[in-house]
Image (tube, rainbow, N blue to C red):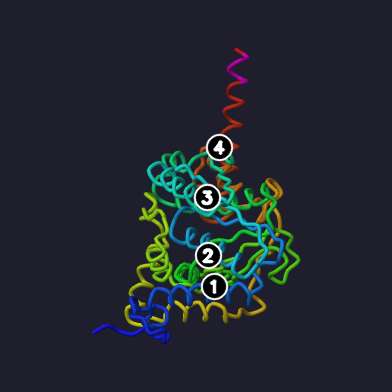
Amino acid sequence: MPITCRSGCGKNAVLKRPKTSDALCKECFFRAFELEIHHTIITNNLFKRGEKVAIAASGGKDSTVLAYILRLLNERYDYGLELLLLSIDEGITGYRDDSLKTVKQNRDDYQMPLKILSYEELYGWTMDRIVAQIGRKNNCTFCGVFRRQALDRGAKLLQVNSIATGHNADDIAETVIMNILRGDTARLRRCTDIKTGGSGDGSNDDTIARVKPLKYAYEKEIVMYAHYKKLVYFSTECVFAPNAYRGHARTFLKDLEKIRPSVIMDIIYSGEQLRFKDTVKKPIRGTCGRCGFVSSQQPCKACVLLEGLNRGLPKLGIGKKSKGERMIAQQDRELGLRARANLVKNDF
C-alpha cells in the first residue's frame, strides 16, 4: 500500500529521510533539504552580499550538490554572491584526472568560472611521486596538508572572500571521533566550527574564511538529492584512501548509526558543546615565515613536509617536531662530513 507524503501534499512518498525518518515525495524532499541549507547559511551568517565565493570542487557528490544548491539558493533568495569553482589536481592517476572531467562538466552545467591548480605547479610534486617515495603509509597526511594549503593559495590568487567546502554531517562526526581517539585537543576545539578563519569566527584573523554550508546535511541525503536531481558526479574512491585513518572512524560511525540513527547529529552537538580547561594549551593561528600562509606552527606543516621530500627525508614531518629537527641535524652533519672529505680528497 502506497504511503502518503508526510508534508500533506497528497502525493505518494518515494523516500524516507534518514535524518528525520519522514516519508516524503521528491518535491517535498527537495524543498526540505534546500530550506535546511538556506537556514544554515542565514542563521550562521556564512556570506555577505557582494562577496566572491570559491566552491572547493572535487567532482564528488558533496561538492557537486554544494555547487548546485549554492547557485540555486543564490538566485532564489538573492544572496548577491559571485560564485566560482576552485579545484585542486593532486596528481593521482586513475582518480583525479577522471574526476576533473566531472568538474569541467559542472562548470558548463552551472555556468561558473573554474580554476584548477595542481600540486606539481605549486609544490613540484604529484601524489603519485610522493607515494612512490614514502609508500602507502602516511600518504593521506601529505595530501591533506598540501590540499588545505593549495585551496588557500587558489583563494588568494582568485581574491575571494571565502571558500565553501562540501564537508557534510558524517564528515564532521568522523572528524570528532578521530580527534578524540588521537587526543588532538587543538583540532577538537575547531573541527565542528561551521566557519573558520577570516573575521567571522570571533578572531582578528585576516585569512580567507572557510565555510561549511552542508554541515548538518547527512551524506545519505546528499546522495539521494543528487540521485533524484540527476546530478552528474564522480563516485570512485581515491586509490590511496583504503589506508586512511578516517576509514576506521567511518566504519565505527556506520556501526553506531545502525543502532542509533541520530548518532551523527548527537556527536556533532557534543563536539559543539565541548569546553576545555584554561590550562589546556591553545595553538595560536598565525602565518608561516616561509610561505606566508596560515599556520599554527613555524614553519607550517606543508613547508616541513615539502622540505622532507626535497631533502630525501620523507618522514621529516611525520611525528613530533623534535624528531624532525634531529633528522635535519643528522643529515646536515653527514653532508658536512662528505664536503670536508671531498676537500681533503681534492688536496691530493
Helix, strand or loop at disc 3? helix
Q: Tag on residue 124?
A: 4
| 37 lies left or right of 208 | left
Q: Nearer the viewer, residue 160 or 302?
A: 160
Counting residues from the start of the chain, the first of labels 3 and 4 encountered is: 3
Residue depth check, mark 1 versus mark 4: number of the one nearer the observer: 1
Discs 1, 3 touching: Cβ within 8 Å: no
| Crowding near the residue tagged with mark 3, few <14, some 14–19, many ≥20 C-alpha atoms within 10 Å | some
Tell me the CA gap for discs 2 and 1. Answer: 8 Å
Counting residues from the start of the chain, the first of labels 1 and 4 encountered is: 1
Discs 3, 4 touching: Cβ within 8 Å: no
| Crowding near the residue tagged with mark 1, few <14, some 14–19, many ≥20 C-alpha atoms within 10 Å | many
Tell me the CA gap for discs 1 and 4. Answer: 38 Å
Counting residues from the start of the chain, the first of labels 1 and 3 encountered is: 1
Q: Residue at x 49, y 59 (%)?
A: 63
Instruction: Tell me if residue 65 comes above or below residue 91 in the rendering.
Output: below
Residue stretch in magenta: 343-347
Discs 2, 3 touching: Cβ within 8 Å: no
Q: In the image, is residue 307 part of the stretch drawn in magenta? A: no
Image quarter in which the N terminus is found: bottom left
Counting from the top left corner in percent of width and height, residue 210 is at 62, 62
Instruction: Tell me if residue 151 comes above or below residue 74 in the rendering.
Output: above
| 335 lies left or right of 156 | left
Which residue is situated farthest in the right direction here?
A: 204
Discs 2, 1 touching: Cβ within 8 Å: yes
Helix, strand or loop at disc 4? loop
Helix, strand or loop at disc 1? helix
Q: Which residue carries the number 2 mark?
A: 69
Q: Tag on residue 107?
A: 3
Discs 4, 2 touching: Cβ within 8 Å: no
Counting from the top left corner in percent of width and height, residue 2 is at 27, 83
